[in-house]
Every structure is written in structure tokens, then in C-alpha cells.
Amino acid sequence: MKEDFLQYLWQYQLFDTTNLKTTSGDSLEILNPGTLNHDAGPDFFNAKIKIGKTIWAGNIEIHYNASEWNKHKHQNDESYNSVILHVVKNNDKTILNANKQEIPTLIMPVDEKLLSNFNTLKNNPVFPACTPYLHFVPQFTIKHQINRATIERLERKTVDILLLAERTNNDWASVLYQLLGKYFGAKTNVQPFEMLTQNLPLKYLAKHKNNLLQIEAMLFGVAGFLEQTPETADEYYLSLQKEWSFLAAKFNLKPLPLTLWKFSKMRPANFPTIRIAQFAGIIYHSSKLFSKILEQKEITQIKTFLSVKPSDYWDTHYQFSKTSIKRKKIPGEQFINTLLINVVIPIAFAYGQYTGNEDLKNKALVWLEQLPAENNTVIKKYKKAGFQIETAFVSQGLLTLYENYCKKLNCLNCIIGHQIIKKI
């Protein structure tokens, strides 16, 4: 048994709370167990208890062994002087706070059946651990946990987006530009794409928004693709190079090392040259894109903003000066959905948070429900376990469950695990 299990029992009061007494023999009544603290400091804040005839308000600290109070140096920490009750499983030592006052102690009566249920769940080798016991859990409880995880995911992304907005002086068009760039890089080229958008401010591209060749020249130039003239250089490449020479001097732009970009073990459709060309097409065709996104009611309209064909040159090329079979290089539906899920919807939600616009935040959630679920290895595991996964709203929630709960066996903080521990 670990401390987190005792915290769980205290949080949900899953023990016999009648006829409680402190180790000194005083009667104890729990009026409010308090709020679990996930940061430094006592385990539960703002609790209220009654010892004898006196009502106490303050904090609760929980340990398996009472001696852990001293082991963790709480006896020297004045922030623990607010503790009104020390809850333990094993009272192996009388403890004092920094004022040398003895703290009332409760030996928690643990329900061994609950402990057995928890260990059964935690030690289950199947993933997710709750798979054999889901029939104990009502569907509305499962749905509630997934919904909560989806919101948790968006709120976490909102923190990062607001920090990015702060770094750009709340230029939200630039925030969108940088986030789109990040996800155009996917996993393999995310770093150079981030460096590209950081080293090429959107305001420079905006000054040439009506000239696709110049937009491409700046993007390919800063990316480092126009520094060396190959023997097979064609007219398009030379035109880009000429524009780059002029624009680099105009805006004092510097190229990134070409070695940052990865081509190996990639499908040609994902080559960084194709992604940069597609990115340029979106910038060229979607003036005031951020404002347009916020104005839309349906996610389908935003898809058209991202379904942009790059310049005709790329119909017959995947790389410079190397011809290929003619094929339009419009971003695929799965890639566009990735941009919507990871860029468009989070930035709309974050902007709603920034402006206090709850309608915009709710619209972002509706957009998630309008998109199909992702189909990666994690989602496949949950499908195999019997989870119903039809929309991106659900798959995003399950990705958070995987990262923050299931992978870490953090069942005590999951309401699905909570239901199972009480029932199996």
C-alpha cells in the first residue's frame, strides 16, 4: 500500500467514518475532507474536522508511516503548521510541527477489499488495465471521463498557446502561422519547421502576400534549399533563387543549415519540399486566415482553406530539378484533419479563453465532434478494449487517458478506475 492509495481513500471517504478517534482517544468527525493538492505543500487544503467539541479548519497531511513526517522535513517547515490532522496507516512516531506542537493523528481504517481491488486492477497485464472490468462501469461514466480528458488536453494546449501569444505580443495571426508550421513538419521535420517560422516572421510574407513565387522564395530560402545551384537547376529553381537573393537582402534573412531537413524513410508526399510548397500555398491563398477561421460555424469550411494546391511546378516534382509522374500535391484529408485537430481547434479554444468568449470555446469542442477519430496505435488499443470511438473528440480524450492515466496506472485519479475499485 502506498501513500497515494491512502489519499484516494481520504478524498472519497472510502472507509468507515463512524466512531473515529484520534490516537489520543478524542472523538473525530470529518466535516469536509478538503481539496486534493497536486503541488507542493500539505496533501489536502481547506478541510474541516471536529475533534471533541472543537471544530478545526485547515489542512490534512497523509503518510503511510507517521515517521515520514520527519523524514520529509515537515517538522521544520512552517507551511505545515496549518495541518490540523495527520492521517496514517502506521503510527510509528509522535510528530510535532515547526512550533513544537503535537498534531492530532488518525490511524485510517483501511478496507482490505478496496486495497485488493486496487492491486488487482494495477497488476493486470492487459492494456488498458480496466479492460476486463469495464462491464462494471456505466457508459455515461466512461463518457464523462473521456469528456473530462478531452477538456484537460485542450486546457493544457491552451497554456502553451497563450505563452506563444505572449512571445508574439498577442499577434494571433503569427501564433497560427507558427503552429501550422510546427505541424507541417510532422514528427520528422518538426524542429526545422519551427525554426523556419521563427526565423521568417509572418509580417515579411504578408508584405508579398500577392506574389506566390516570392512567398515560396522566402520559405525555401530561409529553409536553406536555395544556397547551392545544382547542375540540373531548372528555370523555376533559378527564379526562386533570384527572388531569394533580393528578399534576403531586403529583410536581412539568413538560411538554416540544409542538413536539418530529413528525407530518408519518408513517403515522397511528406518530403519537406512538398510540405513547404503546400505551406506557401496556404499563406498565399488564405489572407487573414486567423480571422476567417473564427468566423466559420462548420469545420468543413475551414478544410477548404487548408486544401490548397501548391504551384504547378510541384505537380511533376517532389524535389527540386527531379521530375516525377504528374500528380497534384494537395494535402490529404488525414493530414488536414491532423492540422484541424492539433492547430485550428486548440487555437480557437485558446483564443476563446484569452478573450473570455465561451461560445468560441464551445464551438471548438463542436468542431472536434465533427471530425472522425484518429486511427493510430494508441486508439487501436482502446478500440480492441471495447471503447466506442467515432469522433476526434473521443480519440483526443483517449490520448490524454493514455498519457496521463493508463500508461502511468494512475487509476486512482480516473473515475473509470474509481468505479472499478469500488465494485470488482
Image (cartoon, rainbow, N blue to C red):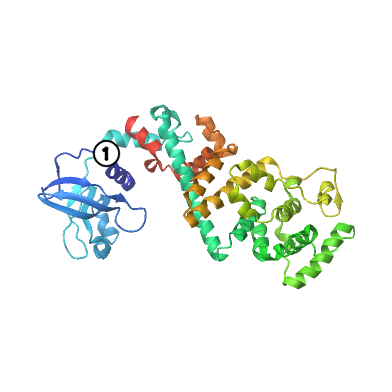
Counting the numbered discs, the total is 1
Q: Nearer the viewer, residue 143 or 404?
A: 143
Q: Is residue 367 above or below residue 210?
A: above
Residue 184 locus on image (x, y percent): 67, 52
- Indicate the position of residue 107 as horizontal and vertical percent values: 20, 46
Residue pointed to by mark 1: 14
Q: Amino acid at mark 1?
A: Leu
Q: Is residue 14 left or right of residue 56?
A: right
User: Residue 301: x, y in percent?
Assistant: 65, 43
User: Circle 1 — which element?
Assistant: loop
Residue 72 lies in quadrant: bottom left
On the picture, is 25 further left or further right than 276? left
In this rendering, the answer to whether 147 lies above or below 167 is above
Q: Specify whether 59 is left or right of 341.
A: left
Residue 391 position within the rendered picture, expressed as x and y whole percent measured from the top left: 55, 36
Q: Quadrant of residue 210?
A: bottom right
Residue 241 seen in the figure:
yes
Quadrant in which residue 75 is drawn: bottom left
> Which residue is at a point 55% across and 63% down the rendered structure image?
170
The residue at the point 23 percent across, 59 percent down is 82
Using the image as rendered, state which of residue 98 and residue 216 is in the foreground: 216
Above or below, 400 relative to 211: above
Residue sitting at x 46%, y 40%: 147
When the figure is inspected, residue 201 is found, relative to residue 53, above or below; the finding is below
The image quadrant where one finds the N terminus is top left
| 122 or 274: nearer the viewer | 274
How many C-alpha atoms fall within 10 Å of the one at disc 1: few (<14), some, or many (≥20)? some
Can you say which quadrant of the picture contains the C terminus? top left
Report whether residue 233 is seen. no
Classify residue 7 as left or right of residue 23.
right
